[in-house]
Image (cartoon, rainbow, N blue to C red):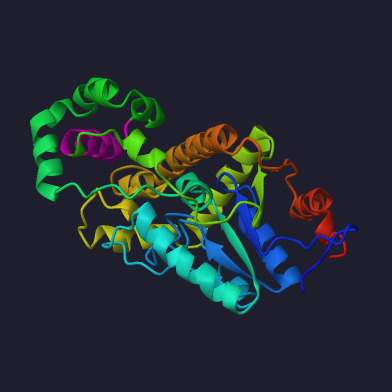
Amino acid sequence: MGPRDDSGREAPRIWLIAGPTASGKSALALRLAQAVGGEVINADSMQLYRDLCVLTARPPREETLLAPHHLFGVADAADGWSVGRWLEAARRELDDIARWRRVAIVVGGTGLYFRALTQGLAEIPPVPREAVDALAAEVGAAGELALRPRLARLDPEAELRIAPGDIQRLLRAVSVAEHTGRSLTAWQADTRPTLAPGSWGSVVLEPPREALYARCDARLERMVAAGALDEVRALMARNLDPALPALKSVGYRELAAHLATSLETAIALAQQETRRYAKRQMTWFRNQTGDWPRLTAVAPEDQWRQFLALNPALTGLR
């Protein structure tokens, strides 16, 4: 039996902790896991890859020894994971944790993972690889300039959702609409959530933007000092397809360019991209999880106090 509030209501057995990069999610998840005897499940699309421990700020071994951690560093960079594949793996972990009657804490910054858990993931018919390749060849060098107006006609909602420069998602949305005769948005509307309503609690970390940006900059410098460049060099040496998800990790491209520029410039560019990524994450969570409680504190101890204040069933914890 878990913690209860004054009315006798038991605390959720599943917690979702979301937010932008460098906001303190991992520390809060670990603190909660230790307090309730819980297990942590990764919901960050880059922390899946074992090749990028430092650059993705994956929890270090000393932290994973304090509470069980799942789906961290489980994939090779050459093996691109989709949202569906992560959801399948997360379901297995959630089921296993539930069998042991322990608390699951899902933590990360990949909004689509949380949406798949709480709203479901459409079972979209597969589009043959040849069809996607043919579409890419057809638009050629025009790329996004050709794809966006085409998608706007086929699926205007998807066109608005997809960020500038995300060619892979544009190709995906256009190819689904043209191959199946139905828009990606329509397919995604036919979903059932993995988590039953009322079975989970949630929180989004949303510190003040300037404080968050300062944390992003400082963490990037710590990453470089801790060996991020060595990770980038090792991954570059494998000559992998640049379209693979792992090679889109924030900061990878900028640090890889360090071979042709100064380290100081590479760090500055990587910091800039990290801040932009954090801003996109904050916008996504603000638009997609507007009804989730917010933590606005910056310091870990203050975040923990805010979290407990928002969840009366946990107020007996320290």
Where residue 219 sits: x, y (%)? 57, 51
Where residue 235 sits: x, y (%)? 30, 61
Which residue is the extreme one toward the right? 6
Q: State the image quarter where residue 196 is shown.
A: bottom right
Where residue 198 sits: x, y (%)? 66, 53
Q: State the image quarter where residue 190 is shown.
A: top left
Q: In the rendered view, would you say 145 is above or below 180? A: above
For the C terminus, give its image quadrant. Answer: bottom right
Residue 192 falls inside the magenta stretch? no
Q: Nearer the viewer, residue 286 or 184?
A: 184
- Please indicate, yes or no, whether residue 84 appears anywhere in the rendered image: yes
Q: Nearer the viewer, residue 195 or 42?
A: 195
The span shown in magenta is 165-179
Residue 170 falls inside the magenta stretch? yes
- Please indicate, yes or no, whether residue 61 appears anywhere in the rendered image: no
Residue at 88% x, 57% y is 7
Where residue 307 sits: x, y (%)? 77, 52
For the N terminus, give its image quadrant. Answer: bottom right
Q: Is residue 46 left or right of residue 239?
A: right
